[in-house]
Image: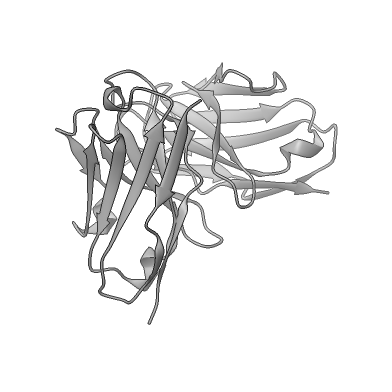
Amino acid sequence: EVQLLESGGGLVQPGGSLRLSCAASGFTFSSYAMSWVRQAPGKGLEWVSTISDSGDSTYSADSLKGRFTISRDNSKNTLFLQMNSLRAEDTAVYYCASHYGVKSIAYYFDYWGRGTLVTVSS
Amino acid sequence: DIQMTQSPSTLSASVGDRVTITCRASQSISSWLAWYQQKPGKAPKLLIYKASNLESGVPSRFSGSGSGTEFTLTISSLQPDDFATYYCQHYNSYWTFGQGTKVEIK
């Protein structure tokens, strides 16, 4: 059974940093692209960042202006999101999601974690 | 960037109704479109991929159609479990979601 478990969320002050993790199990993690998607309270889904199966290619939403960095450790079946210079508008539930298709990045998200809440406030 | 626009934003319907949600892309996306269902406090769930392909395990009352710039998600006979928010998503060239359509009880 595919499982994705996010962790690392919490309360952080504006300008601070946070590192989210997503522990994967039940599939060959190193063969699949992964993404982060966020959802602000009461709002819709927003794509944040994507990384290829090998980690060689990454893509991020322009709106983040380079503040977030996606990475992965295939030896530990874990996905990361390093978030810097956090703002109040980054407050959201952050989901990790796996892509359909072995070694293919350009597909939809077939499995999702339950999410971790990040709150940016003083 | 490709923009995805859903309509309506909210839809009131009764059990047994036929429900249709529309998603429009700002430029042609061929059939690179997925639909997700999300219930409060839960992660999104994949329903449809490549515009019209039903994900395994999803009830057959859900169907998708369209190509190019206009797409629809149809629920043939609305069930109590279907009251939720639905999102379309373009993929293949970055990943963009529509703003969502909330299906509520009439």
State the residue lying farthest toward the front.
A76
The image quadrant where one finds the C terminus of chain A is bottom left
**How many marks overall?**
0
In this rendered view, identify the residue nearer to me: A98 or A75. Answer: A75
Residue B105 sits above or below residue B30 on the image = below
Q: Position of residue B105 (x, y in %)?
A: 80, 48
In this view, B66 is above or below B8: above
Q: Position of residue A40 (x, y in %)?
A: 47, 60
Q: Does residue B56 appear left or right of residue A117 in this picture?
A: right
Please tell me whether residue B61 is drawn above or below residue A76 in the rendered image: above
Q: Residue at x 37, y 64 (%)?
A: A90
Relative depth, front residue between A65 and A122:
A122
Name the residue rendered at 36%, 34% in the picture.
B27
Q: Is residue B51 left or right of residue A12?
A: right
Q: Residue at x 36, y 26 (%)?
A: A107
**Residue extending furthest left?**
A56
Which residue is pictured at 40% across the width and 60% down the height?
A9
The answer to which image quadrant residue A58 occupies is top left
Q: Quadrant of residue B82?
A: top right
